[in-house]
Amino acid sequence: MKKNKTKYNLGYFVLFPFFGGWAKTPYKKVHKRNSYDNSGAKIVSTVRFGQQYENAFWSPELRQMVYGDGDESTRSFTASIDVVGHEITHAVTDSTSKLLYQDESGALNEALSDIFGTLVEYYQGEHSNYLIGEDLFIQPDKAVRSLSDPTQYGDPDHYSKRYTGEDQSKFVHTNSGIVNKAAYLLAEGGQHFDTQVIGIGKEKMGDIFYRANTKYFTASTTFSQAKASCIQSAADLYGADAAEVQSIKQAFDAVGID
């Protein structure tokens, strides 16, 4: 899934394209957010975009989400609740921190969309897991990305393994795996390389990242700055000496983010 500013004339408009819509996302249920911009914007999507288009994106220019129908190997991109949650999170980020879609800020932008894609699935009461796009594929046991094991789909799970090339689309999508893994460890706990992480659950993990994205992240936030912002967010929510603060430090340390 990617962001795209290209104009188009195919497809048609629908409101938020899954059952329950905005009301059943953590943005509304937990944070009482009034649409993605917190000002009541209508949530509109174009579906059936293009010909056998295998992607979905948030268009900041048109202020709507756009979904392809897929091809012979994939279903419509509206078939996956976590993909829909991923795209609406780009809209939230576009209205809050405005993370630039390049370098580490762009990878953080992508990671936030994956994190909240899984949380939208969780709050919908669906088969909650840490895969993104597993419902898209005709062939079973496939997905686009994994938060629990980013390496399963070719993404790094540690900063030392990050992609450092010049392809920005690859940079932001591939390196999102590093923050995705930190978020997974923060929620579920476990040992990663030499670091043991005490998990705090999906809901608290989501609350911390939401506060960081809406209060502390800026357009150019790096991974290291994101760690500091999440620590501050946890201190705001639970106290500076809370166990949640220590868990954030552990989770980011585990993926090599200082």
Image (spheres, rainbow, N blue to C red):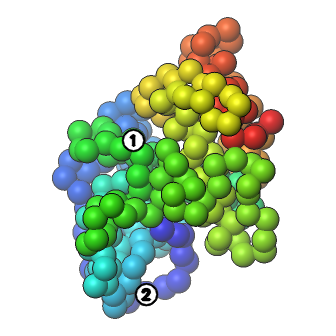
Where 26 falls versus 89 (above or below)?
A: above
Where 81 falls versus 59 (above or below)?
A: above
Kind of residue indicated by mark 1? Leu
Disc number for residue 8: 2
Kind of residue indicated by mark 2? Tyr
Q: How much space separates mark 2 and mark 1, taking CA atoms?
A: 30 Å
Asked whether the residues under the numbered discs 2 and 1 touch, taking CB atoms below 8 Å apart as contact, a structural biologist would say no
Q: Is residue 186 left or right of residue 101?
A: left
Sequence-first disc among 2 and 1: 2
Q: Percent x, y for residue 128?
A: 31, 42
Residue found farthest to the left: 19
Disc number for residue 119: 1
Q: Percent x, y for residue 180?
A: 56, 46
Q: Is residue 118 left or right of residue 187?
A: left
Where 48 falls versus 149 (above or below)?
A: below
**Circle 2 SS class:** loop
How crowded pointer 1 is (Cα within 10 Å; few <14, some 14-19, many 20+) is rated as many
Q: Percent x, y for residue 107?
A: 65, 57
